[in-house]
Amino acid sequence: MNRTFGKKLSTSVTAAALMFGAGAFASQDELEPVLNAPSDKTLSYDWPMLKVGTGTYEEGPTGVTVFQFEEKALVAVDVRGGGPGTVNAPYMDLGYNYAELDTIVFSGGSWYGLEAVTAVATALKDDGIRDGNAFSLEPNIAMSVGSIIFDFGSRRLNEIYPDKRLAQAAFRAAKTGTFPLGAHGAGRFAKSGGFFGCNAFSGQGGAYREIDGVKIAAFVIANPYGAITRRDGSLAACYEAEGWPEGTLRTPDLMQGFPASRETGKSAAEDEAASSKNTTVSMIVTNQKMDPADLKRLAVQVHTSMARGIQPFATQYDGDVLYAVSTGELEEPKFYSPDLGVMASEVMWDALLASVPEQQKATTPDATVRHSAAELEAYAGDYHFSQFASLSISAEGGKLFAKASGKRKVYGIEHEQATELKPVSQGEFMVPGRYPLTLRFGQGGNLVINPGHWEQTGKRSPAR
């Protein structure tokens, strides 16, 4: 590449990011971490040894979930699927029989989010909790492990990722006893069921049981290519395709009816292309003391059981990873490893179901809503969501139209063919299709797509 051209390109992108404000950004240093955000649904658990902190960048939105153990714990890992992203997985597989684990970190942002894992390790050192001594009888060096999910692609219109600053803030905000369920932390923009085109919103789930003094906790960031399935076989969440049978939709019916169950006609909005890059990362924790071999088998058994709650599971396009942790507080084992595995598997299924938030509802066009020509012209312009995604809005013949004008299409709105926006209310429009696609023009020149918990905000560029 010509060096001068490369320099000019970099400068122009940065200038554009500064100009477009909320819809794009020049540096993640401008973003404000949101820590332990309140949730409509929360898991309560009684386990002082285990603390959890969540952090998000709402501009993404994307986030990180940090699990901290007050004393070092023993850990094993089971890795499946075709695209895992982990830190320190090979070391865990060596099976050393002493406790070294301090934290497990789950993050959005694909491989960029792995920065969050090592950032928590340095926070442990910087805060004086651990040091660099790895050679004493009881090593005091920080051990942080973790995994990422893919939350880019068609689901959000920017490439903000959980970074060192966000991860360390979430770690320092960690507390025990509560865990927010749904679209929070690393699960802030997770989705499920892309295999069948469901594209349902997902998130992080947790469940906890205590049986005869044995504590079992399960945590999961559910972002699977397969569909999350209840114990009765019904889909936990799905944006259903036209032509699917009415009534309770069951995953076994979709599996048995494949590939016909995935073949549907596509409108512009439906061509949002289900994400084919997914991952479910999870953790099972018990206070029962276990040796490395038993802990490894627990990881394998529980991970295998998750194929009941996610169908299909561990595909080429998933990067599934499960961590099994023993805090060793209960010295005398109460259950054999297979028995503990059965109970832990059920707790994990509970956690998986708890990850599903209330789904975003599609708006309905209203034929009685009228916009004057002047109002429609006022909405026309270019709206920038990031240096990758922009929309060009135009008014013609008493109607409003949208075209993608950046490098990528915008939720099924293409570059070549204009998509008509149907009025819903004053300043609000929608595109019919399988998935919710609402556009709201607001004050200050903003355009919000799918207003609400997963909204994407674009800034209008100045008129020339």
Image: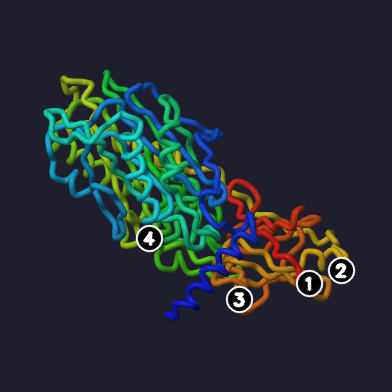
Dot 3 crowding, Cα within 10 Å, few <14, some 14–19, many 20+: some
For label 2, the residue is: 373
Q: What residue is shown at x 83% (from left), y 59% (from top)? A: 369
Q: Are marks 1 and 2 in contact (CB under 8 Å)?
A: yes
Q: What residue is shown at x 50% (from left), y 50% (from top)? A: 189
Q: What residue is shown at x 39% (from left), y 57% (from top)? A: 278
Q: Nearer the viewer, residue 447 or 461?
A: 461
Q: Which mark is residue 415?
A: 3
Tell which circle, 2 or 3, labels the residue nearer the N-terminal end: 2
Q: Is residue 245 visible?
A: no
Amino acid at pointer 1 = Ala
Amino acid at pointer 3 = His
Dot 1 crowding, Cα within 10 Å, few <14, some 14–19, many 20+: some
Q: Nearer the viewer, residue 234 or 384?
A: 384
For label 1, the residue is: 395
Residue 269, position as x, y percentages in the image: 60, 66
Q: Nearer the viewer, mark 3 or mark 4?
A: 3
Residue 416, position as x, y percentages in the image: 62, 79
Secondary element at image label 2: helix
Q: Is residue 399 visible?
A: yes
How far apart in space, not on screen, are marks 3 and 1 (Cα)? Answer: 16 Å
Secondary element at image label 1: strand
Tell which circle, 2 or 4, labels the residue nearer the N-terminal end: 4
Q: Nearer the viewer, residue 265 or 379?
A: 379
How far apart in space, not on screen, are marks 3 and 4 (Cα)? Answer: 37 Å
Secondary element at image label 4: helix
How far apart in space, not on screen, are marks 2 and 4 (Cα)? Answer: 52 Å
Q: Nearer the viewer, mark 2 or mark 4?
A: 2
Q: What residue is shown at x 13% (from left), y 30% (from top)? A: 136
